[in-house]
Image (cartoon, rainbow, N blue to C red):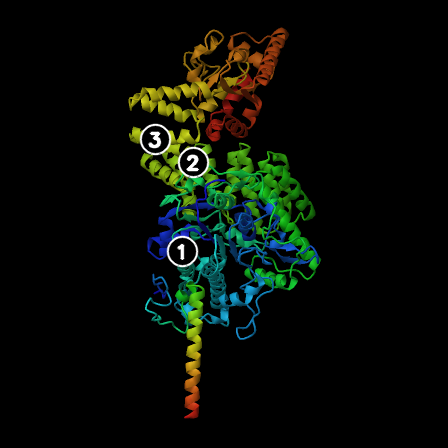
C-alpha cells in the first residue's frame, strides 16, 4: 500500500466559481480565506466536461468517471416505475463515489448536499442529500425534514437545527448584497427574496458541514454549495461592467450582489478552514466557470438547459495543506482528476476504469500513483443504496418544480408521456455530447442520427450531427445535414450557428475565402459564439493576411481577454508584420494563460531572436521542443542560435543530429509533363508566399513570360541528391520522368499538373520552334502517356508521398477555387488570393489562340 | 459601502475566551451565518431572548 499523505481531506464544491470574478476580490483583500488557502497550496484552472451540466459534472468529480459510466445524464430522468419525469437521483448513479470507496477502506466519510444525492445513501458517516434545505412555503408553518434526506435517519431532528428558512433572512443579511434594498418594489421585483432563498440554502449545508466537523470523527468530508451558480445565473447580468441595454437604476441596485456572494462564500470557507485545522488537505473546486464581461451571452435560446450556455469552460481549483507544494500553480487539471487525487492522498490505488489522473505534480514528494483494476469489484459495505431502493415521487416533483423555476428545465407539458419522451431525448443528446468530448465519434453518430431522425425540426440535434460528421471527416454527410437545416431554418437565431459550422467545414476543406464570407455573416447575429473571431483570425492567418488577422484576434480578445489562442494568434500576426515587441508581449500572454502551447513558445522564440535576445529565444525554443520534440523548425533555430550566437556547438550539433535521425523533412514538388502548367504552378506558389527553389538560369521568354522556376541540380537528380536538404520546407519543380529519383528520407507533397496530351504536345512543338504539323505525333503522345502512368504509379506506391492532381484547365477556369484547394494541400498556408491573381487569364487566351 | 461583518479570528468566534459573549444582533448577520451551526444557535438564542424581552415589556405595559 502506498504512503498516506493526507490525514484528512476536506473537499469543498463551489458550483460555477470563476477566477475572473475572484481575482479582483483577492487583489483588493476581499477574499482573505481563499488567499490563505492559495498561499499554502496550489491554484489553477480546472477544465470542465461537456455538456457542462452540474449533476453530471459533480458526479464525475465524486466518481472520477465520465457520465456514460456513472449514469447521471442531465438534470432530470424518467422514473423507471411511473414513466414520469423526476429529478436525477443518486439511485441512478451506477458506480461508487469517493465516500463509498473510502468507507470500504476504513475511512470515516461524510457527504453534504452533493448534486445529485437524494435519497441519502446509507453511509456509515453522515450523509445529507440535496433535498434537505428545500423550504416549505411559509416560515411559520411546520417544516418537517424532507423524507430520506438525512442518513442516519435518527440525526434528522438534530440536523434540522442547521436549516435556515428564507423567512429567517432579514434585511441585515440582504443589505450587504443590495445596499439600496429599500428602493426595491418587492411586489414586482422578486430578486430580494431570491437572494434570501439562496442565503438560506447555502447557510444550511454549510451549517451541516460545521456540525459534522464539530460532532463526528472524520477522515473525509465532501460539502457542495450550489449558490454561486444560482447567484450568477440571476445576477451576472448586473455585474460590472454595465451591459448594453441594462437600465441604470437596476445596475445600481444589483451590481454588488455577485461580489457579495463570493465574499460570503469566503467567510464560510474561513470557518471550514478553522474547523478543519492545519493538518487537513483542503480541495476547493468548481465544476465550470461562468461567463462574465463581454462573454455574457446576449440572449439565451428557449432550449432545455440553455442557461448552461452561460457556463465557462474552466473553473477554479485550489489544493492546500500538508504535503502540497505551497504557493504554486497547477496546470492541466480536469474534473475527472479529483477522485484519483483524493485516493492518492489517502495512499489508495486509483481505479484503472477511472477517466482522470492523480494530480501528483501538486505533491511535495515524488509519488507514483498505484492502480487497482476497478473499485466496483471490491466487496464490503460501501454505503451505496441497494438495488431495490425507489424514488420518493413527491419530493422529486417538488425539486422538479424548483428546476423549472430556475430555468434549467423546460416546463413540463400537459402530457406526462410527451414530457418523459422529451427528457429521454435530452439525456440521449447529452450522452452523445459525452461521446464527442471523449473523442468517441463512432458512438456519438448513431445516437445523434436517431435523434435527428426522430425530431428533424430540432436544429441543435442536427447541428451537432453535422459537427460530428465534420469531425469524423464525413464532409458530404455534414454538408447534406447543413443544407437540410438551412431549408428548415425558421428562427433568425439559427442562421449564425449554421454559418459558423459551414464556415468551419469550408475552412477545413481548404476553402478559406468562402468560409470567411459565411463567418462574416455569422458575426452579425446575436448568437453566443466566442470562437467565431478566433476562427476568422485563423483563416486570415492561413491566407497570410496578417493585418486582418491582427484585427480579428484583437476583436476576439475584446470579448475574451483571457483567450490564450487569441493572444497567440495576435503574436503570430504581429511577428509577421515585424511588430516585434507586440509579438513578444502577446506570446508571453498566451503562454502565461496556457503553458501547453508549443506553437506560442515557438513564435516567442522567433520574436525574441528578432529582438536580439538570443539567450531567451533559445529558452523559448527549448520549451517548444520539450512539448513538441518533432518540431524541426524549432530545432533548426536552436542549432543556429547555439552555433552562431551562443558558442555552444555541442548543443547545436545535438539538435541537428536529432533532426537527421528522427525528423523527416517535407519538400513540396511541382511535377507533370513539360508544358503542362508546372511553371504556372511554381509562379502561383511563389506569389502565395512559399519559398521556391530556382537558380534562375533559364530566363523568362515568350513561352514562359514569368520564368521557368527551374534548377540545374534537378536535372542531375539521378546522379546527386545531396542538395535536397536545401529544399526542405520549400518548393522545387521536378518533371514527371525524374520523380522516381527523389530519394527516401523526406516526405514529398507533389502537385501533379495534368493537361490534355494534345495541348501539351502542341505547346512543346511551338516552344521548339516547329511549325504546326498537321500529323498528330501519335508515338510521342503514347510515350508521354506511359511516362505519366509510370509517374502516377510511382507516387501511389511511395509511403512518403502525398499528391494532388491539378488540371491545368481547371486552374484557368476558376483560379481562386483551385488556389484554395492547392493551398490547403500544401499545409504551408500560402495566400490563395495572391496565388489566383498570379494566374493571368489574358496570357492563357493569348497562348490558346497561338498554340 | 458593504456591510460585511469581518469574522473575528478567535478560537471560539461566538464566545470570547473569558466567556463574555459578542453583541449578537437579533436581526442576524452574514458573519453569524458563516459561522455555521454555532452562529445559527447564537443568533436564534438572541432572537428568542429579544422576543421574550419584548413580549415581557408589552406584558408589563399592559399590566401597568
The answer to whether tags 3 and 1 share a subunit is yes
Q: Nearer the viewer, residue A655 or A573?
A: A655
Is residue A716 at all visible to an observer of this figure? yes
Is residue A423 rendered to the left or right of residue A169?
A: right
User: What chain does badge 2 belong to?
Assistant: A
Q: Earlier in the sequence, mark 1 or mark 2?
A: 1
**Which residue shows up at 60% across the image and 15% down it?**
A793
Query: Can you give x and y, in whole percent of width and height, for residue A406 in the image?
Result: 55, 60
Real-space CA distance between mark 3 and mark 2, rounded to the nearest whole angstrom: 15 Å
Which numbered dot is residue A273? 1
The answer to whether tags 1 and 2 share a subunit is yes
Report the mark closest to the observer, 1 or 2.
1
**Which residue shows up at 55% across the image and 8% down it?**
A771
Query: Can you give x and y, in whole percent of width and height, for residue B7 in the image?
Result: 36, 63
Residue at the disc numbered 2: A597
Q: Nearer the viewer, residue A274 or A469?
A: A274
- Mark 3: which secondary structure? helix
Query: Can you give x and y, in whole percent of width and height, for residue A592 in the image?
Result: 38, 40
Q: Residues within 10 Å of mark 1 (few under 14, many from 20)?
A: some
- Mark 2: which secondary structure? loop
User: What chain does badge 3 belong to?
Assistant: A
Which numbered dot is residue A619? 3
Above or below — where is A426 with respect to A476? below
Dividing the picture into quarters, in which one does residue A712 lie? top left
Amino acid at each position: 500500500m502506498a504512503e498516506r499523505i493526507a490525514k484528512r481531506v476536506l473537499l469543498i464544491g463551489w458550483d460555477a466559481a470563476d477566477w475572473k470574478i475572484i481575482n479582483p476580490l483577492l487583489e483588493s483583500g476581499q477574499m482573505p480565506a481563499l488567499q490563505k488557502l492559495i498561499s499554502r497550496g496550489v491554484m489553477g484552472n480546472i477544465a470542465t466536461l461537456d455538456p457542462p451540466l452540474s449533476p453530471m459534472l459533480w458526479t464525475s468529480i465524486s466518481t472520477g468517471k465520465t457520465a456514460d459510466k456513472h449514469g447521471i445524464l442531465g438534470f432530470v430522468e424518467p422514473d423507471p416505475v411511473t414513466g414520469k419525469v423526476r429529478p436525477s437521483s443518486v439511485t441512478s448513479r451506477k458506480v461508487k463515489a469517493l465516500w463509498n470507496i473510502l468507507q470500504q477502506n476504513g475511512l470515516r466519510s461524510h457527504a453534504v448536499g452533493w448534486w445529485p444525492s437524494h435519497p441519502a445513501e446509507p453511509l456509515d458517516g453522515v450523509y445529507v442529500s440535496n433535498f434537505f434545505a428545500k423550504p416549505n412555503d411559509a416560515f411559520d408553518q411546520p417544516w418537517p425534514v424532507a423524507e430520506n434526506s438525512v442518513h442516519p435517519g435518527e440525526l434528522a431532528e438534530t440536523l434540522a437545527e442547521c436549516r435556515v428558512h428564507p423567512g429567517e433572512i432579514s434585511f441585515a443579511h440582504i443589505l450587504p448584497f443590495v445596499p439600496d434594498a429599500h428602493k426595491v418594489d418587492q411586489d414586482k421585483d422578486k430578486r430580494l427574496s431570491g437572494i434570501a432563498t439562496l442565503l438560506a440554502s447555502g447557510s444550511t449545508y454549510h451549517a451541516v458541514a460545521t456540525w459534522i466537523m464539530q460532532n463526528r470523527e472524520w477522515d473525509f468530508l465532501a460539502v457542495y454549495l450550489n449558490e454561486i451558480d444560482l447567484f450568477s445565473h440571476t445576477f451576472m447580468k448586473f455585474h460590472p461592467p454595465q451591459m448594453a441595454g441594462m437600465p441604470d437604476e437596476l445596475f445600481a441596485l444589483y451590481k454588488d450582489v455577485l461580489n457579495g456572494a463570493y465574499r460570503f462564500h469566503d467567510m464560510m470557507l474561513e470557518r471550514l478552514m478553522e474547523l478543519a485545522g492545519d493538518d487537513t488537505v483542503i480541495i476547493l473546486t468548481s465544476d465550470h466557470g461562468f461567463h462574465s464581461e463581454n462573454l455574457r451571452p446576449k440572449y439565451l435560446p428557449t432550449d432545455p438547459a440553455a442557461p448552461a450556455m452561460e457556463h465557462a469552460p474552466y473553473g477554479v481549483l485550489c489544493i492546500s495543506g500538508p504535503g502540497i507544494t505551497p504557493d504554486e500553480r497547477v496546470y492541466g487539471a480536469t474534473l475527472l482528476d479529483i477522485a484519483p487525487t483524493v485516493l492518492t492522498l489517502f495512499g489508495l490505488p486509483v481505479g484503472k476504469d477511472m477517466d482522470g489522473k492523480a494530480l501528483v505534480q501538486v505533491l511535495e514528494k515524488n509519488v507514483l500513483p498505484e492502480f487497482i483494476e476497478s473499485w466496483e469489484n471490491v466487496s464490503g459495505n460501501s454505503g451505496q443504496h441497494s438495488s431495490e431502493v425507489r424514488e420518493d415521487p413527491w419530493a422529486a416533483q417538488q425539486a422538479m418544480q424548483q428546476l423549472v423555476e430556475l430555468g434549467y428545465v423546460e416546463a413540463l407539458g400537459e402530457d406526462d408521456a410527451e414530457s418523459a419522451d422529451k427528457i429521454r431525448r435530452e439525456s440521449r443528446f447529452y450522452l452523445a455530447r459525452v461521446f464527442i468530448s471523449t473523442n468517441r465519434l463512432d458512438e456519438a453518430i448513431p445516437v445523434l442520427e436517431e435523434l435527428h431522425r426522430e425530431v428533424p425540426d430540432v436544429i441543435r440535434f442536427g447541428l451537432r450531427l453535422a459537427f460530428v460528421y465534420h469531425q469524423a471527416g464525413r464532409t458530404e454527410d455534414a454538408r447534406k445535414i447543413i443544407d437540410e437545416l438551412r431549408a428548415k431554418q425558421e428562427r433568425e437565431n439559427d442562421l449564425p450557428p449554421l454559418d459558423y459550422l459551414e464556415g468551419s467545414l469550408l475552412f477545413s476543406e481548404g476553402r478559406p475565402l468562402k468560409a470567411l464570407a459565411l463567418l462574416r455573416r455569422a458575426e452579425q447575429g446575436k448568437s453566443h459564439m466566442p470562437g467565431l473571431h478566433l476562427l476568422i483570425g485563423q483563416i486570415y492567418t492561413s491566407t497570410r493576411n496578417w493585418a486582418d488577422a491582427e484585427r480579428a484576434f484583437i476583436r476576439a480578445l475584446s470579448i475574451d481577454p483571457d483567450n490564450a489562442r487569441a493572444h497567440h494568434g495576435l503574436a503570430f500576426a504581429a511577428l509577421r508584420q515585424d511588430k516585434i515587441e507586440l509579438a513578444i508581449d502577446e506570446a508571453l500572454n498566451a503562454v502565461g494563460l496556457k503553458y501547453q502551447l508549443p506553437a506560442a513558445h515557438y513564435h516567442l522564440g522567433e520574436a525574441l531572436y528578432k529582438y536580439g535576445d538570443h539567450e531567451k529565444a533559445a529558452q523559448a525554443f527549448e520549451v517548444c521542443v520539450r512539448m513538441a520534440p518533432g518540431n524541426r523548425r524549432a530545432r533548426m533555430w536552436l542549432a543556429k542560435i547555439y552555433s552562431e550566437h551562443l558558442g555552444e556547438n555541442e548543443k547545436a550539433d545535438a539538435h541537428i543530429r536529432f533532426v537527421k535521425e528522427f525528423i523527416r523533412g517535407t519538400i513540396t514538388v511541382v511535377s507533370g509533363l513539360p508544358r503542362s502548367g508546372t511553371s504556372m504552378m511554381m509562379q502561383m506558389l511563389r506569389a502565395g508566399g512559399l519559398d521556391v527553389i530556382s537558380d534562375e538560369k533559364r530566363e523568362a521568354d515568350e513561352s514562359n513570360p514569368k520564368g521557368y522556376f527551374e534548377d540545374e541540380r534537378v536535372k542531375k537528380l539521378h546522379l546527386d541528391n545531396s542538395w535536397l536538404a536545401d529544399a526542405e520546407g520549400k518548393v522545387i519543380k521536378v518533371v514527371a520522368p525524374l520523380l522516381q529519383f527523389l530519394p527516401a528520407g523526406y516526405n514529398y507533397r507533389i502537385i501533379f499538373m495534368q493537361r490534355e496530351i494534345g495541348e501539351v504536345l502542341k505547346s512543346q512543338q511551338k516552344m521548339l520552334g516547329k511549325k504546326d504539323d498537321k500529323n498528330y505525333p501519335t508515338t510521342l503522345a503514347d510515350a508521354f502517356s506511359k511516362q505519366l502512368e509510370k509517374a502516377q504509379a510511382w507516387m501511389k506506391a511511395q509511403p512518403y508521398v502525398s499528391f494532388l492532381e491539378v488540371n491545368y484547365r481547371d486552374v484557368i477556369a476558376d483560379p481562386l477555387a483551385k488556389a484554395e484547394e492547392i493551398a490547403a494541400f500544401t499545409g504551408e498556408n500560402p495566400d490563395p488570393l495572391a496565388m489566383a491573381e498570379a494566374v493571368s487569364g489574358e496570357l492563357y487566351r493569348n497562348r490558346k489562340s497561338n498554340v | 459601502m458593504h456591510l460585511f461583518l469581518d469574522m473575528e479570528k478567535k478560537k471560539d468566534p461566538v464566545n470570547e475566551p473569558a466567556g463574555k459573549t459578542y453583541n449578537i444582533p437579533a436581526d442576524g448577520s452574514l458573519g453569524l451565518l458563516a459561522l455555521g451551526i454555532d452562529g445559527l444557535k447564537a443568533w436564534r438564542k438572541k432572537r428568542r431572548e429579544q422576543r421574550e424581552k419584548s413580549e415581557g415589556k408589552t406584558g408589563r405595559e399592559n399590566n401597568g
